[in-house]
Image (cartoon, grey):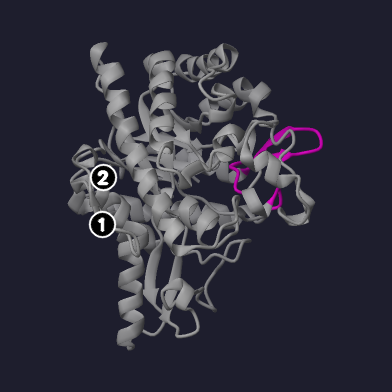
Amino acid sequence: MGGSEGHRLFPEGFLWGAATSSHQVEGNNVNNDWWDWEQLPGKVAHGDKSGDACDHYNGYRQDFAMARDLGHNAHRLSLEWSRIEPAEGRFDRGAVEHYRDVLGTLKSFGMATMVTLHHFTNPRWLTAKGGWARPEVAGLFERYSRHVAEQLGDLVDFWVTINEPMVYATHGFLLGLWPPEKKSIVLAFRVAKNLAKAHGRAYHAIHEVLGVRGRRPMVGIAKNMMLFDPKNPASRLDRMVAQKLDRIFNRSFLDALANGVMAFPVVSRETDPRLDGTQDFIGVNYYSRSLAAFSLRKPQMLFMDLSVKEDAEKNSLGWEVYPEGLYRILMSVKGYRLPVYITENGIATTDDRQRERFIVAHLREVARAIADGVDVRGYLHWSLIDNFEWKEGFAPRFGLVGVDYKTQARNIRPSARLYSDIIRTGSLP
């Protein structure tokens, strides 16, 4: 199925790999807010609890060997803050040693490491203090980031401070879908501001710690970029809503990190010069698009209504499969003049042929963006292995590698082999 060796679409040195996050794969993250929330009835689909998850905490070496054998030269993972700092101000030496071994294993396999410091979960002690709704969280996150940079910095090639800040802010504090289940537009954007400030402080801490050692770290965020198109392109109001959503959800956070100006809706605008220029690369997480419409019935959502195109191909979560959106998103970040890494892109499906088509179609759009001048330097598929998909539980299958949760057996899917061919040839079938 491999493409022709002659027509290389992706540059030499391109990073190819997959991504995971601690709570979704490790198992037994008993000290965080998600673990507590999962124990409550009706919170997660089918009554699922993360439990042992994929037992990756113990099986990481085998999982990484599999990725290496598939030709991956990079891997993105997250550290579990609640393991590293299980009580406020007390850092766990054993947890740090564990992650040294995890990252050292990737290095020994010749793979670049991309480390995420915050991927949705919070230590229980932080949640008890009010979590991300409290301004002091920025200093607490800076202290944790500094500790990690001191202890693990020699093993990290790329740093993602925060995964999908706007998803975290909206799902936990506006829509009430995730812990702490708040439904306040003011609180959601206050949290967004705190996330931006925390990123800025972590960025400088990592640069300080590693700069003294003569290293130049690459630090950014992984930004979920949703494509918003007007539901009715002829409607001026629908077009306006689509533009507004793009500005709020996609642009506001990236702009804050570019120019230091935090301009989120319904909270006071604030300028922080220490935020200015705090991205060494842009991480793009792309999955889907939404159709946006004006709705008088939704004042709590700023009169904005979202839907999915009815006759479109969808994944098993009902999200539209829209490859061209990845090209459009990549073109939209070109103006920031930073290297771009696709930090997540993948599909929940039980039909692996659909995953094969998804990978090829989306990589075709990446190649087109590269040809049109976007400095894309890597692609990390979501996910390496099936995992615990937050509120949706274990049903969604995102993995290049299947997981039997009863036996923890791994099953390399044909899509993983196809991706392997693409990596080997740098071309598309």
Q: Earlier in the sequence, mark 1 or mark 2?
A: 2
In the rendering, which numbered label is found on residue 398?
none
Tell me if I can see residue 112 in this picture.
no
Q: In this view, does 20 lie to the left or right of 140?
A: right
Q: In this view, does 205 lie above or below 21?
A: above
Please name the residue that numbered disc 1 is placed on.
Answer: 269
Q: In this view, does 369 lie to the left or right of 125?
A: left
Q: Is residue 117 left or right of residue 57?
A: left
> CA separation, marks 1 and 2?
14 Å
Viewer-proximal residue among 61 and 213: 213
Q: In this view, does 369 lie above or below 203?
A: below
Look at the image and give the residue range highlighted in magenta.
393-413
- Local packing at callout 2 (Cα closer than 10 Å; few below 14, some 14-19, many 20+) is many
Residue 165 screen position, x and y as percent = 42, 48
Tell me if I can see residue 272 in this picture.
yes
Please name the residue that numbered disc 2 is placed on.
Answer: 257
User: Could you say whether the residue bearing mark 1 is in a helix, strand or loop?
Assistant: loop
Viewer-proximal residue among 198 and 247: 198
Viewer-proximal residue among 17 and 42: 42
Residue at the spot 54% in from the left edge and 35% down from the top edge: 126
The image quarter containing residue 384 is top right
Residue 377 screen position, x and y as percent = 30, 38
Membership of 427 in magenta stretch? no
Residue 241 screen position, x and y as percent = 35, 76
User: Could you say whether the residue bearing mark 2 is in a helix, strand or loop?
Assistant: helix
The outermost residue toward the bottom is: 234
Give the residue type at disc 2.
Answer: Leu
Give the residue type at disc 1.
Answer: Arg
- Local packing at callout 1 (Cα closer than 10 Å; few below 14, some 14-19, many 20+) is few
